[in-house]
């Protein structure tokens, strides 16, 4: 019964989200894991569907099996996609000038280069994923650390203590190889887990967040 309710809640959230045409999206649920399959007509729509499912209370993990199928009149040449990607990155003040390189192959964009912060890496991906004709994005931008591990740990722990929605004492933060953050402990829900992850990613020089947090299962209402 629980899984049927969870599946319906995910389905309702997909249909409620105005950026998504949920007609061709299938939803399955098992032990808090929501599996999305079917197809959408843009990569941005696919990302919106994943975000919508993540918002649903009781969802602890997502399996993404959604395909992007462009209508024949929406297909765009790789050369044009590349030009648009370069332009939109140049216009974004959050992306360092000339720091990101773009490769396009059959509608799939690969981003490379070096930046100092994760928000810069994410901003570059967000810029290009909405472009017409994009089937997917591989973000291989490297984050170059310029800060000591102990300082990273201190910054993250202070951020967690400042966050009203996070029980900081229940979270353990470990820094591995100077630039990888390992998060352990328990959180009450997916929103709290996202808040903890965001705090970790917001520290300078962080390349990877290894999220080992356990989300406590909440009853659906």
Image (cartoon, rainbow, N blue to C red):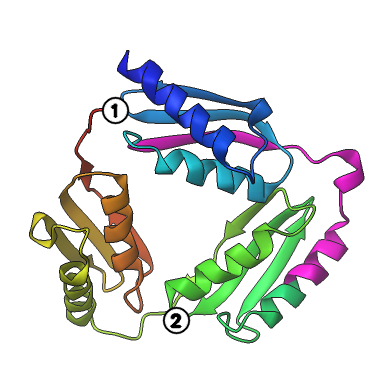
Badge 1 marks a residue whose secondary structure is: loop
Residue 84 in the image, given as x and y percentages of width and height: 79, 69
Query: Going by the image, does 122 lie left or right of 199?
Result: right
Magenta highlight range: 60-85
Question: Does residue 68 belong to the magenta stretch?
Answer: yes
Foreground mark, 2 or 1? 1
**Disc 2 versus disc 1: distance between alpha carbons?**
41 Å
Image quadrant holding the C terminus, namely top left
Badge 2 marks a residue whose secondary structure is: loop
Asked if the residue under mark 1 is in contact with the one under mark 2, i.e. CB atoms within 8 Å, the reply is: no
Residue 86 in the image, given as x and y percentages of width and height: 74, 74
Residue 147 against residue 125 in the figure, above or below = below
The quadrant in which residue 94 appears is bottom right
Query: Going by the image, does 108 lie left or right of 29?
Result: right
Residue 159 against residue 108 in the figure, above or below = below
Q: Viewer-proximal residue, 56 or 117?
A: 56
Residue 116 against residue 110 in the figure, above or below = below
Residue pictured at 67% horizontal, 74% vertical:
101
Residue 89 against residue 20 in the figure, above or below = below
Where does label 1 land, which residue?
A: 220
Circle nearer the N terminus (2, 1): 2
Image quadrant holding the N terminus, namely top left
Residue 142 in the image, given as x and y percentages of width and height: 49, 71
Where does label 2 land, which residue?
A: 116
Q: Residue furthest top?
A: 1
Residue pictured at 23% horizontal, 66% vertical:
176
Query: Going by the image, does 96 lie left or right of 104?
Result: left
Residue pictured at 29% horizontal, 67% vertical:
199
Local crowd size for mark 2, using a 10 Å CA cut-off: few (<14), some (14–19), many (≥20):
some
Residue 147 in the image, given as x and y percentages of width and height: 29, 85
The quadrant in which residue 88 appears is bottom right
């Amino acid at each position: 019964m629980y899984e049927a309710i969870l599946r319906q809640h995910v389905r309702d959230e997909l249909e409620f989200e105005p950026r998504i045409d949920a007609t061709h999206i299938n939803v399955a649920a098992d032990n808090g894991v929501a599996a999305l399959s079917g197809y959408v007509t843009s990569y941005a729509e696919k990302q919106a569907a994943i975000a919508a499912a993540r918002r649903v209370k009781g969802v602890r993990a997502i399996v993404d099996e959604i395909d992007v199928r462009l209508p024949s009149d929406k297909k765009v040449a790789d050369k044009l996609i590349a030009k648009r990607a370069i332009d939109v990155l140049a216009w974004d003040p959050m992306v360092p000038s000339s720091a990101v390189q773009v490769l396009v192959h059959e509608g799939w964009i690969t981003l490379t280069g070096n930046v100092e912060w994760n928000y810069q890496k994410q901003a570059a991906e967000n810029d290009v994923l909405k472009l017409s004709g994009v089937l997917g994005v591989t973000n291989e931008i490297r984050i170059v650390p310029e800060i000591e591990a102990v300082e990273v740990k201190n910054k993250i722990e202070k951020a967690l203590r400042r966050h009203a929605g996070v029980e900081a004492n229940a979270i353990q933060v470990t820094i591995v190889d100077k630039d990888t953050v390992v998060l352990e402990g328990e959180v009450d829900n997916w929103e709290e887990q996202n808040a903890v992850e965001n705090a970790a990613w917001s520290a300078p020089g962080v390349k990877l967040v290894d999220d080992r947090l356990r989300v406590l299962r909440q009853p659906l209402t």
